[in-house]
Image: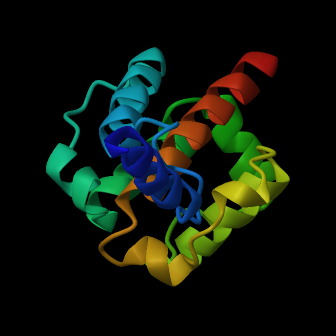
Amino acid sequence: PGQRKWETMRARRVNSDPYGFGQTSGGLAYHIEELRCELRGALFDEPLFLEGLAMGDASAVFPLIRFMLLRFSPMLSRLLVTERGYKLLGTSDLLFVEEVIRLARHELNIGDWHMLLTPEQMLAYGHAELKVAFLVELTRHCRTKHLEM
């Protein structure tokens, strides 16, 4: 009886997870470790603001996005900014996030299921697991796109 009750509670918790990040994904700590591995592969040598990432702080997320899109690969940066016309430099944070979401969908083929957050939510505290999962996918796709060039 006790085992059955636990299974029912676990099933409710996993099934009530609207984003699909329940027990199967490993949670926030798993995504942060995955991000650290991906960033090591991208030769990211700056310190990570782990507390900020764990809280979903935009000030911890934006430097990683900027690194991957603007500094990681000069070829990818040139493609996105010069040839494709994405406005990633000298814009407000809201416009920057809107451009990142647009280019993630159109250029990096990151599907809609990754974009469960609105630009306003990306700028606010919270939604840490979704933000870190997005960073993992963005890093992977930028690295792949760089190798294809």
Give me the residue at 36% from left, 51% from top: 63
Looking at the picture, does residue 101 appear above or below residue 76?
A: below
| Residue, far left | 51
Q: How is the image coloured?
A: rainbow
The quarter of the rendered structure image containing the N terminus is top left
Q: Is residue 88 left or right of residue 144?
A: left
Looking at the picture, does residue 41 appear above or below residue 107?
A: above
Query: Which picture quadrant has residue 26?
Result: top left
Residue 115 can be seen, yes or no: yes
Q: Position of residue 134 (x, y in %)?
A: 54, 50
Q: How many badges with numbers are in the image?
A: 0
Q: Position of residue 42 (x, y in %)?
A: 48, 22
Give me the residue at 37% from left, 47% from top: 6
The quarter of the rendered structure image containing the C terminus is top right
Residue 84 can be seen, yes or no: no
Q: Position of residue 23 (x, y in %)?
A: 45, 41
Q: Is residue 61 left or right of residue 108?
A: left
Query: Which picture quadrant has residue 117?
Result: bottom right
Of 126 and 48, the residue lying toward us: 126
Looking at the picture, does residue 36 appear above or below residue 40?
A: below
Q: Position of residue 57 (x, y in %)?
A: 27, 65
Q: Is residue 12 left or right of residue 141?
A: left
